[in-house]
Image (spheres, helix red, strand yellow):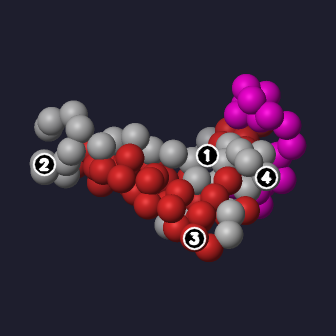
Amino acid sequence: MKKDGGVDILFDSDKEAANNLFDKLAEYGLFVVRKGELESWLLQLAVPGHGPNWLIKIFEKMGEDPESQDYLKPSDDDVWSFCGEIKKWFTNPNRKGIPS
């Protein structure tokens, strides 16, 4: 399941149940990659591979110079949305789980 699309491959009621569970976990600071693996992020960069090799290649492809035309700027979807949810939890003074 983690290699084939995560919760997106589930049917309606199972998908809803999985998302409800992951929503509840997120309330306590446990964040699940719902699409399966990290390699499901930034598909537009067309980076093949898996594990540490993939990670190195994805960072190289993202670029390091914000002035470069090829530099990948953060957006409101994909991995950026995931990171945004983590930030919201950390900055919430009423969060569940680890107290602020």
**Residue under label 2:** 93
Q: Earlier in the sequence, mark 1 or mark 3?
A: 3
State the CA–CA distance, disc 4 to disc 1: 33 Å
- Residue type pointed to by label 1: Asp
Mark whose residue sits in front, 1 or 3:
3
Disc 4 residue crowd, few under 14, some 14–19, many 20+, Cα 10 Å = few
Residue farthest to the top, as pictured: 52
Q: Earlier in the sequence, mark 4 or mark 3?
A: 4
Does residue 66 appear left or right of residue 90 in this picture? right
Q: Earlier in the sequence, mark 2 or mark 1?
A: 1
Q: Can you tell which quarter of the image residue 7 is in?
A: bottom right
State the CA–CA distance, disc 1 to disc 3: 44 Å
**Residue under label 1:** 65
In x, y percent, where is residue 54? 77, 35
The residue tagged with tag 4: helix, strand or loop? loop
Mark whose residue sits in front, 4 or 3:
3
Q: Residue at x 59, y 65 (%)?
A: 15
Does residue 81 appear left or right of residue 3 in this picture? left
Q: Can you tell which quarter of the image residue 11 is in?
A: bottom right
In x, y percent, where is residue 79? 56, 53
User: Which segment is the magenta one?
Assistant: 41-56
State the CA–CA distance, disc 4 to disc 2: 36 Å
Q: Residue at x 86, y 43 (%)?
A: 48
**Residue under label 4:** 4
In x, y percent, where is residue 97? 23, 38
Q: Which mark is residue 13?
A: 3
Dots 1, 3 in contact, CB < 8 A = no
Q: Residue at x 82, y 46 (%)?
A: 47
Q: Residue at x 79, y 28 (%)?
A: 53
54 in magenta = yes
Mark whose residue sits in front, 2 or 3:
3
Q: Earlier in the sequence, mark 2 or mark 3?
A: 3
